[in-house]
Image: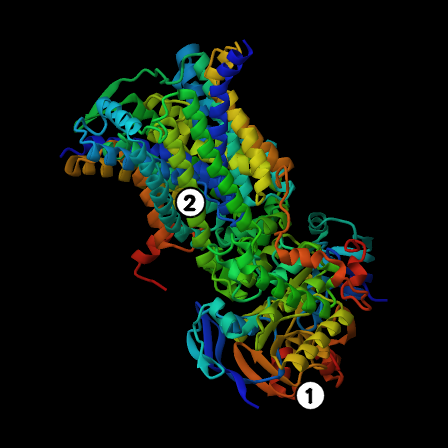
Amino acid sequence: MTAILQVRDVAKYFGGIRAVDGVSFDLNEGQIVGLIGPNGSGKTTLINVISGVYKPNRGKIFFKGEDITGLDPWDIYHKGIVRSFQVPRLFEKLLVVENVMVAHRNQKGENPVIAPFHSKWKDQELEYARTSLHTIREFGLSRVRNNWATELSGGQMKLVEITRSMMSEPRVLLLDEPAAGVAPKLAREIFSHIVRIRDEYGLTFLIIEHRLDILFDYVERVLVMNYGELIYDGDPDGVYKDPRVIDAYLGE
Amino acid sequence: MQIEFLASYMPIFTSFIVLFAIYLIAALSLNMEYGYGGIPNFGHVFFISVGAYMAGVLTARTVDYIAGIKAGYCSGQASVLRTEYLSSHPMEAIAIFVASLVLGAIIGGLFGYAASYPALRLKEDFLAITLIFIGDMGRIIARNEEGIVCALTGLTGIANPLSFIKDVGTRSIAYALIVVAFAVLTYIYVQRLAKSPFGRLLKAVRDDDLAAMALGKVVPRVRGEIMIIGSALAAIAGVLRTFYIQGVVADDFQPLITFLVLTMVILGGMANNKGVILGTLIMTALDQFISPSFLSLLGVSVEFDVTYMKYIIIGVIIILVLMFRPQGAIPEGPVETPALELSRSSEWDVEEKLEIGGEEESSSSSE
Amino acid sequence: MDLSIPLMNSLTLGSLYTLMALGLTMSFSVTKIANFAHAELVTIGGYVTALLVNWMGYGLGESLIAAFFASALLAVAMDEGVFKPMIKRGSKPLFLLVASIGIGLVVRYLLFIYADLNAVITVQAKANVQLIGRFGRAGITTIHLWVFPITIASVVLLHLMFHYTKPGKALRAMADNEDLARVSGVKIYTLRRLMWFIAGGITGVAGGLWSAYSVITPEIGWYALLRIFAASILGGLVSFWGTIAGGLIVGFAENFGITFMNTYFNVSTAYRPLISFVIIVIVLLLKPTGFAGFDFIGWLKEKMKGGGE
Amino acid sequence: MADYIIESRDLTAGYGKAVIIQDVNFQAERGKVTAIVGPNGSGKSTFLKTLFGLTRVFNGNVIFDGEDITKLPPEVRARKGLGFVFQVNNVFPNLTVRENLEMGAYARTDKEQIKKDMEEILDIFPILRERQKQKAGSLSGGERQMLAMAMALMGRPKLLLLDEPAAALAPKVVTQIFMKIRDIVNSGVTVILVEQHAKRALSFCDMGYVFSSGRIVMKGPGKDLLADEKFVEAFLGKR
């Protein structure tokens, strides 16, 4: 197995607070990896650093061997790393299908010079639309595809976010609590979608999730963070036995 | 008798059409920036004025140069000579008109691009404050510099490109047609943009710029693009206005104009170009018909300047619409691209076995 | 170059801007509304004062009290009639700003109609102005005896209110964290009304003083608004002392700046408003993330201490 | 039977349409410390907010001091003797420490007693006495947390709800905070404490509850819970 994403000694400070403090790990292609840790342990900050929202104070990030440290979020997206948000950030005044359509890369019609000439981009648009609608169907969202994003339930919003991230043919998905605030049954459904995508497309996942009982049924590897540091990297079962992890969660 | 009656109303009608068309261009461009793009460009009048000044300066300087007018840039005599020259040289007049439109749009676009810089950094309401004052600073400079549009007196003699047509009635109708043509073109243009992936992109950036960035959209570039487009269109409206009133005065570009145009957009419905037509129609009617000249035509006279009434009504409309119908007369709809058409076809309907989130939402989404 | 005249002008106008900007800062810090109709609070105060002095023969003092109440009530009416209902309907902050522009238009042009009908488009309160002394070439008149004490008294009274009374402290608490204030048992709606009343009132008094100082028109408030925003923005739109310093800085920068540029670079005095605008832009460039809640004066103090981050 | 100052019966609550906690039966004994522990997202903070009336209740009741308060708004609960310390944004940063404390007593009218309480509380928190004139925004995290607790105490609550008072604080400061909580309990105030760090909270409290996925999964005297071998699994969520 090859490492698709390499994080090397990455640190991010806010004032005096060390949100992420020297984290290193490799993500191997096709793995589903859980990222857990107590509140404020730096998980979301780490995802923000990898996806380019924050520039790290120290350290390097490599994607397929290429240094992507400090690139802008849109460049990182185009490289093939896509992230989702803890609170779903759908575009409110767009329909579900439009939310998914936005995510396509290299849309000719997004250039304002070409946009008025519909014939120049119509074919591409229809091709993208088919891809979008197929994926929407795969995710069981067909029934709400022409609804406004604001009309969805929390679980549906989470699914739209994942559907949307699939449009750019990404290699790595960073999901920030893909099932937060969703009832356990639906959360499991979201996770089985994730496993399905991995199996079909060979994608790599890094997933933050708090409900370990659910998460551990779907991941083969777990990273645990505490106070900005990585304190565990291994299989899910070991988490319950590792004294450092237990201390992190229960207090020393 | 009847013809005479019609003839006496014709000027009012043509002037209404011209102003409607000019306002429409301005309102559509503000709708692009604010309604679709989410940039509260409340300094819109400044970008209109840039086009207006451009037309004035370019025409006056060029004519003074090629016709060898030595009477002084701001003098009344120069103004007369310019008009004479332009009405006897149709080719030059039209060339200058076209050049003004092109240059006005370019300069307007450049200023718009510059204004997108703060748009990237400030919170919405502070951006609005800054842009309102930017707009008024432009006016203050123009009203104090002789070299631009002759300070307070204003620059005159910017004759209509059609002044070679001797009959005033025919000429004004012809010019009205040109302006209307521009308005129609603008409408088609913004409507095509709005129905394209670019329109969708604009709305996405407006609704959530961070999410748009995370989906690979270069948000600063998108903001720059929309400000360039919007400001260039606003400048074209300004150019058309200068040639219509055959001159340009800095104090015509008060912040009030922005608010009038903004009311057109809000009243009609933000991010909806059809609504903006409706809003512009209503507000232009107000603007035109609550005027001393029109009221005296109707035989109505009031003791005060009736234009004050106009602004009061604008204020009342702003408040009422924002309070009771913030989405405007015609609310925003989806972006009508071919993708949406495809999505609406029943081909994609499926009987689904297990649908996520179904238990809560089944009632609201069973269309 | 004799600086006595710009100095006196700076102090006088700076004081007026300070009073007006304090009103804006108060209302912004508590409600987070960038209120463009603040301009009209100045104008109404000015007209009430001028008309009472000129037509009814009241003294300047009584007229200023009337101006206080007129603008105070207008401010409360704006909030109760427009802002509060809009907030209840879930309006965005920007819509509140646009609505305040609408309110401004209504008030300003109603006043225009009134002024037109009564031939008071330009008016000045004919207060009994007497020269009482000289400072260099600048005259010190009875107007100055009104402006400076009222400004100082207002600042002192507001300071006392904010720091030594229960509602005053509660207002500061509300500006800080409305939810926590509510949980602490603060009746936020009553206090909000009180805040608008005081903020409107002092702004009206400032307008009244302006009408005694020079000629006013129904647009005087709009004319002042740029300065008011500049002064408030220097205090981050939330800081009391920052706003006071801001008002004086704007007053001084404007008068000295334009005198200097006029004398040495032959710049027209009509460019006076650009100075306030430049101040806004400078604050913006120094703090490009936006100046909401950014206390410029506080920031400068930090820098002076030589701290840095 | 024990004297419960507050209890919840079959309480189901959440925000909007979302149910976060389900069928919670909880009791807190008067004069004792009750701790609620559980991982992120287990609903423990939501439960605390529900006790104070800050969420939507779908089902069940909250009984305070023998009275059903399920339908009362938070400000009325505050007047009945409930105090709440939020996890974040729990002080007024631009007010001085003393003014913050005065705001804590805002709803009270007994001026003389407020003065006495102020002195008493400044005795309990000497660091706050030192910083009386300083703005709350300039305090360190631990000092701010103490101020927040002191503010709540100024309202003279019978029951104090503390939402993660030690979150994001250095270990040394955490010890201080817990010592102060002990002082508060000793002065006769009942405390309910929500904590992520279970060991700390459970060894400190009289009675502990473990939340997971919105439900109570274990309860018992704190030290017994810690000794229970099932505890770690229950806490982290078993597979």
Compare residues D17 and B149 and report the one nearer the observer. Answer: B149
Q: Extreme bottom residue here?
A: A1
Compare residues B225 and B65 and report the one nearer the observer. Answer: B65
Q: Tell me: residue A206, above or below residue B8.
A: below
The three-letter amino acid code for the residue at tag 2 is Ser
In the displayed structure image, the side of residue D18 where residue C114 appears, left or right = left
Q: Tell me: residue C248, above or below residue A250.
A: above
In the displayed structure image, the side of residue B59 where residue B196 appears, left or right = right
The x, y position of residue C130, in whole percent, is 27, 17
Q: Tell me: residue C226, above or below residue B358.
A: above
Say what secondary structure mark 1 lies in: helix
Q: Residue A31 falls in which quadrant of the image?
A: bottom right
User: Which disc number belongs to residue D74?
Assistant: none
The three-letter amino acid code for the residue at tag 1 is Asp
Compare residues C130 and B60 and report the one nearer the observer. Answer: B60
Give the labeled residue for mark 2: B231
Chain under numbered label 1: A
Chain under numbered label 2: B
The x, y position of residue C92, in whole percent, is 57, 45
Say what secondary structure mark 2 lies in: helix
**Discs 2/1, front:** 2
The x, y position of residue C279, in whole percent, is 33, 44
Residue C37 seen from this side: no
Label 1: few (<14), some (14–19) or many (≥20) C-alpha neighbours in 10 Å:
few
Label 2: few (<14), some (14–19) or many (≥20) C-alpha neighbours in 10 Å:
many
Give the labeled residue for mark 1: A237
In the rendered view of the protein, which quadrant contains the C terminus of chain C?
bottom left
The x, y position of residue C163, in whole percent, is 47, 43
In the displayed structure image, the side of residue A38 where residue C141 appears, left or right = left
Residue at 44 percent of width and 31 percent of height? B256
In the rendered view of the protein, which quadrant contains the N terminus of chain C?
top left
